[in-house]
Image (cartoon, grey):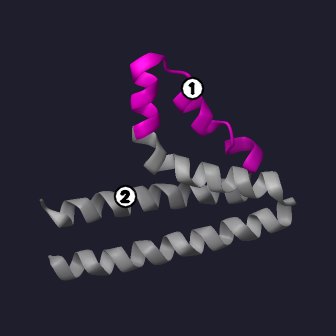
Amino acid sequence: MDWGLVLTFIIAFLSTNFIYGLFFLIAYKGISNFYPWITQEMDGVIFLFASIVLFPVLGVTYHVAAFAYGKCNWFFARLVILFYLAVLITLIVLLSNVLMKMI
C-alpha cells in the first residue's frame, strides 16, 4: 500500500473540511443545508454510497457546526468552529510535513 497516496487523500479531506468550516464560520444559515441536500436527495443504494463517500469530505464539519450552533449561542459556536479550524490546519501542516519527508 502506498502511504503517500493515503496521506494525500487524508490531507485533501482535511482541506475540504477546512474550507467548508470557513463557510460555516461566515454564514451558518446559508451553508447549513448543503450537506443534507447532497446526501438526502438520492435514493436507495446511491444514498448509502453518497453518505459513506461524502461523510469524510463534508460530514465531519457539518456535524461539528450543527452541534456547536445547536447547543450554544452564535458567539461561542463560532469560537468552537475557530478552534476546530485551528485543529484542522494543524493536522494539515503536520501530515504535509510527514508526506514531504516520505517523498
**Magenta segment range?**
28-52
Q: Is 100 located above or below residue 22 in the figure?
A: below
Circle nearer the N terminus (2, 1): 2
Residue pointed to by mark 2: 12
The residue under label 2 is which amino acid type?
Ala
Q: Is residue 47 magenta?
A: yes
Q: Is residue 19 left or right of residue 66?
A: left
Q: Position of residue 17 (x, y in %)?
A: 51, 56
Quarter of image, res 14:
bottom left
Q: Is residue 72 magenta?
A: no
Badge 1, how many Cα within 10 Å: few under 14, some, many 20+? few
Residue pointed to by mark 1: 40
Q: Position of residue 46 (x, y in %)?
A: 40, 22
The residue under label 1 is which amino acid type?
Gln
Image point 63% across, 50% down: which residue? 63
Q: Position of residue 80 (x, y in %)?
A: 71, 68
Quarter of image, res 45:
top left
Q: Position of residue 16 (x, y in %)?
A: 46, 55
Quarter of image, res 64:
bottom right
